[in-house]
Image (cartoon, rainbow, N blue to C red):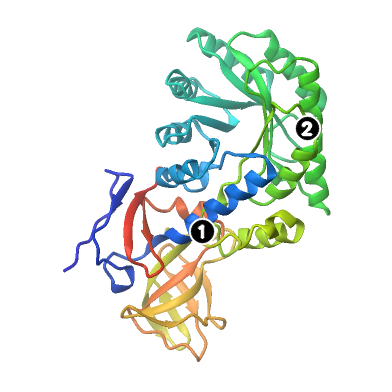
Amino acid sequence: MKYQRLRHKSATSLPYPNGLNLLMQDICLPAAVLKQQAIRHNLNWMQSFANHSKVLLAPHGKTSMTPWLFQQQLAAGAWGLTVATAYQAQIAAEAGARHIILANQLVGKANMALVAGLVQDGTEVFVCVDHPAQVLALSDFFQSLQLTIPLLIELGVDGGRCGCRTETDLMQLAKQIQSLPAVQLAGIEFYEGVVKGAEPEQGVRQLVRQAARLMATLQQQQLLQYPTALISGAGSVWYDVVAEELTKAVLPEQIKLVLRPGCYISHDQGIYQQAQLQVLARSPLACSLGGDLQNALELAVYVQSLPEPGLAVLGFGKRDAAFDAGLPQAMAIYRHGNLVTEDLADCETIKVMDQHAFWRFGPSIQPQIGDIVLLGTSHPCLTFDKWRTLWVVDERYNLLQEVDTFF
């Protein structure tokens, strides 16, 4: 019997001996799979976009929470990493990130202590703020340790999540930061993904322009105290618009422009594929780079049951893949290691339970028990977080290494 590993947390990356192949049933299924060639392509594509746009990348680590992928992003040229929690910041620092944006409010002494430890170890951590009470708490805590923490004021929108709702609030917060010890203002952060309305693109452009104008005002009024000044925005949907607006804004050259897309590393076959089509429709630069982002995250499962004509039960469910933005859909069927078909237009995953998926198939498909079905997912963040271990494969599904997630 061929070598097989169970999921574990003893290593973040484990190479595999030659000869093991997913399609030959050499690992337990269901399994989440990363295609190495697509990962490399996506890394190079987004880094090329950033370089041509003259912006920096700090990819959002919450997408994958996989140190091996963090290291690939940093090695490809990312300036730093973005995270949502103090714990995630620790994982990013351990993966080698020297610049981290905590794109969230840092609240609570235990969380502050964890971030303080990273700062003491030499990691630059930028923290978002949007309220005077939070600024005061950060000042008191970091002053007690004789440390300085750089702050980014978050600019929010009505009906959104965190962030100052008015320019007056933002400017008053900047002046408060200037008056307190142990905190220094480094710039402005925003997240345009919460902008709604009949014309969201126009709303996004207005938000970015507002952030850039306020950044210039902070600079003019000498309220930017931290040596590294930056303005940061952009998730995985509007990164082209944010880059365009920031690069044409009137800002001092020393201010860093930092984008934070995260889902490009794996892409998907759903909402981010649709978002990327819109990027290509808007951005001549994206079109000029050659190729496009590729789906790199797949789910490999067995045909588990054939209970009635035209219906198969596949061996996966809500415990294994995202289901909030469209159900995983089949891309290929393999039998005994050989491709059966990639023409699955008349097949559809129609329902998922905890660990069963209902899969309708047309008359042209005759699945058998034990067939391996490869599926693409939508919203990769909520597929990554279902798995403790991911399997890196080549284009023939040979196993290359095992990598761990740290959710």
**Could you say which quadrant of the image residue 137 lies in?**
top right
Asked whether the viewer can see residue 34, the reply is yes
186 vs 317, nearest the viewer: 186
Q: Hey, what amino acid is under mark 2?
A: Ala
Secondary element type, mark 1: loop
Residue 246 located left or right of residue 226? right
Residue 220 located left or right of residue 49? right
Please provide percent x and percent y for residue 82. Answer: 55, 37
Q: Residue at x 42, y 74 (%)?
A: 373
Marks 2 and 1, how far apart at CA: 35 Å
Depicted 109 relative to depicted 156: above or below: above
Depicted 153 relative to depicted 44: above or below: above
Please provide percent x and percent y for residue 313. Answer: 42, 76
Residue 275 located left or right of residue 328? right
Q: Residue at x 28, y 53 (%)?
A: 15
407 vs 224, nearest the viewer: 224
Quadrant containing the N terminus in the rendered view? bottom left
